[in-house]
Amino acid sequence: MPQKLNQTETNSPQQFAASDRRVRRSLQARYACTSPIKEQAYRIRYEGYLSHGYIEAHPKEVLCDHFDDEFHAPSVVIYDDGKAVGTVRLCNFDSTQPGSAIDRLPSGELFELTAEKIRARFCPDVPDVRAIEILKLAKIPECESDLWVTMALFKMLKIVATAMRTHVVFASVRVPHMNLYRRLGFEIVEEPRYFAKDNIVLGLMACRPNDFRSIQDRAERIFHGPKALGTNEIQETAATFFRGEVVDVFPHISSDTQSDAERFRLEQYPLRQRAA
């Protein structure tokens, strides 16, 4: 039998009140390119997935798989005042690279993705296909309802996807989380289905990098003022990130944006994500 979906998840203004009272946030990102930073990513995943009941507790208290050893699947770790609080993994597919195979995307086999199918639907006028799949997105339990950590993860995704000239971003999404992804600009590509091997219900969603909208676009205006990061800044930020250096995720935040940020938070939440 399919596993029971988790209960309705609600992000309300009350839930954000405690953690988001402080608008000036020192959020940084690093590429998990060393063993200590990878360990931080694995522990965040473990804590986050365990708190939702997605996995069973085990002594090592880390969550990783064979994709973490692949060069094309870098993980991002977000830090709040030096503490590791969130992570996401970005698996890349580039048909221009020797030996490229769509099964290098974790959802490639699950949803029968092929380069031809991706090209036909998302980039019919290009000779080659570049895609990213986001997965293993997690936050430590005490930051579960923290808006800024969530936006930092998607901001780094947008920077990497834009810098790599990605045509489409995929995500295998649990039903209760689909509403949030829709508000970020994702659309359903494959309706949710049950996968017996993993005892899980997932749907495939996709987004072109230029289509990050709603919450993401408004966050850009709040954090960067009238003008978001330009192309050169995105390239420089991505280069800094892939060198393994610390990246300031929201470098232009100022106290002048406090009222706008508070209004944004209250308008966008609650987000009631109901199971189908």
Image (tube, rainbow, N blue to C red):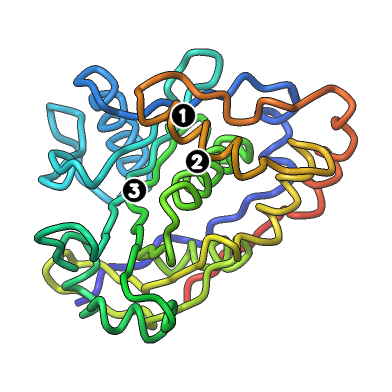
Give the residue number, with chain letter if any, for mark 3. Answer: 90
Q: Could you say whether the residue bearing mark 3 is in a helix, strand or loop? A: strand
Q: Residues within 10 Å of mark 1 (few under 14, many from 20)?
A: many
State the image coordinates of residue 15 (x, y, percent, origin top left): 66, 40
Whether pointer 2 and pointer 1 mark residues with C-beta atoms closer than 8 Å, the reply is yes
Q: Which mark is residue 189?
A: none
State the image coordinates of residue 62 (x, y, percent, origin top left): 20, 31
The one nearer the camera, 47 or 126, is 126
Cα distance in 3D space between marks 2 and 3: 10 Å
Q: Earlier in the sequence, mark 3 or mark 1?
A: 1
> Hey, what amino acid is under mark 3?
Leu
Cα distance in 3D space between marks 2 and 1: 9 Å
Q: Which mark is residue 78?
A: 1
Residue 46, image quadrant: top left
Rendered position, 128 above or below 49: below
> Hey, what amino acid is under mark 1?
Ile
The residue at the point 31 percent across, 31 percent down is 41
Q: Could you say whether the residue bearing mark 1 is in a helix, strand or loop? A: strand
Give left or right: position of 221 versus 60.
right
Give the residue number, with chain letter if any, for mark 2. Answer: 156
